Image (cartoon, grey):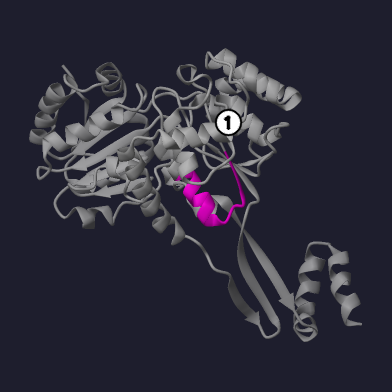
Amino acid sequence: MVVLRTLDLRGSLPSPPQVRGLLPRAALDVDAALEAVRPVCDDVRDRGDAAVLDAGERFDGVRPPSVRVAADALAAALDGLDPRVRDALEEAIRRTRLVHRAQRREPVTIDVAPGTRVTERWIPVQRVGLYVPGGRVAYPSSVVMNVVPAQEAGVGSLALASPPQAEFGGLPHPVVLAAAALLGVEEVYAAGGAQAIAMFAHGTSSCPAVDVVTGPGNIYVTAAKRLLRGLVGVDAEAGPTEVAILADDTADPAHVAADLIAQAEHDPMAACLLVTPSTDLLDAVETELDKQVAVTRHQERVRTALTGQGAAVLVDDVDAGLAVVDAWAAEHLEIQTADAAAVAGRVRNAGAVFVGVWAPVSLGDYLAGSNHVLPTGGTARHSGGLSVSAFQRQVHVVECDRDALAEVAPRIAALGGAEDLIAHVDAVEVRLR
């Protein structure tokens, strides 16, 4: 029997920090993992490809024939791709490209004062490393979600890494290779975990160092990102996946249960939260969970997640439910209420919001066009999902003529003097004498 842990917050809602403390999330001790990944990253820095290959043999149970995947392996994977999967990937690429192309920013010039202007430019980084996990299942959709925004940002050099698979002779999963080939990515590496992140950050004889690393992964990937942040830019420290569903008595309990199970299917550490003012809905969802979990393919994994990090929160009304989901700041948030679009418009904290009965998280994972690399662990309070901006940086270009500099010189002198930076003042005055 599957019963969600029930928290009754009707009557008085705790403060947001208290709400976050009450609601379940899998513990993720990145600091402890740092000590495990540090020697791996140092070894890759010192020994390059040999260290990456050794780590693959140690952690993935197979030694790839080489770190870089040969071009003929990419071509063979694409040739052997199931036509239905190819069709789905091509449509996912088309939709994702439409959404991310709209994120491009054009230069903006601001005339600050007569003779002084600032132009804001968004310039792509030169080279990126894109990580695609490959533990329990293959994720060709994550190839799309990483590659497309980098391409739309204008990045000229893309490298992709995914763990070697013993089942496939030390190569990444063929469907991952096929997705890369479909997107025109020619540089693919059979490397997973911390060693892949270190390969990107330090560079090896096979893989030149990159400027930015993106993509989800396990706790060791997350720890390596934290360790190497600064040497390279990183997108986020992704943790176990999670969903919150805000639903009232208009929601279909079969849909709610199915969406909780779909998220739990990812990982035994996945967090699944139902927030509702309806005890009738909660009872009906638990009945549906019993039926649906019993026949789902990854039953053991789902049960572990739902019993470990699954919960239902009873609230007074949808307004109180909004306060709860905003406090928890879920990676994925579904709104299954009356007037769902209006309720969704009031959400402040979520990685992505899915509105109404026809927009399940599964749509966003594959074919909505939105990005599924999203902030977890409550970081949606301050961070957003992967986008074109992750692969660009903002540069201000400043122009000024003599008269404009002379006009502002007394104010520069005042501020420079207040900060005791007299050479700053002199650097202006020497031009105006």
> Up-down: is 44 above or below 114?
above
Q: Is residue 275 left or right of residue 94?
A: left
Q: Residue at x 63, y 78 (%)?
A: 112
Q: Is residue 308 left or right of residue 180?
A: left
> Residue drawn at (29%, 55%), measured in percent from left and top?
346
Q: Position of residue 248 (x, y in %)?
A: 14, 43
Q: Which one is in front, 346 or 375?
A: 375
Q: Amino acid at mark 1?
A: Val
Residue 173 sits in quarter? top left
Q: Main secondary structure of the magenta part?
A: helix
Residue at 57% across / 36% down in the picture?
A: 71
In the picture, the quarter occupied by the N terminus is top left
Question: Is residue 428 located in the magenta-colored stretch of the structure?
Answer: no
Q: Provide residue 416's location: percent of width, then percent of height.
A: 80, 67
> Looking at the picture, how far across and down is residue 170, in whole percent?
53, 20
Say if the magenta span includes residue 150: yes
Residue 152 in the image, given as x and y percentages of width and height: 51, 56
- Which is nearer the eye, 210 or 300? 210
Find disc 1 in the rendering and name its residue: 69
Callout 1: 10 Å neighbours few (<14), some, many (20+)?
many
- Kindly state the secondary structure of the residue where label 1 is placed: loop
Q: Residue at x 32, y 43 (%)?
A: 88
Q: Is residue 349 visible?
A: no
User: Which stretch is magenta?
Assistant: 145-159
Question: 18 or 429, which lies in front?
Answer: 429
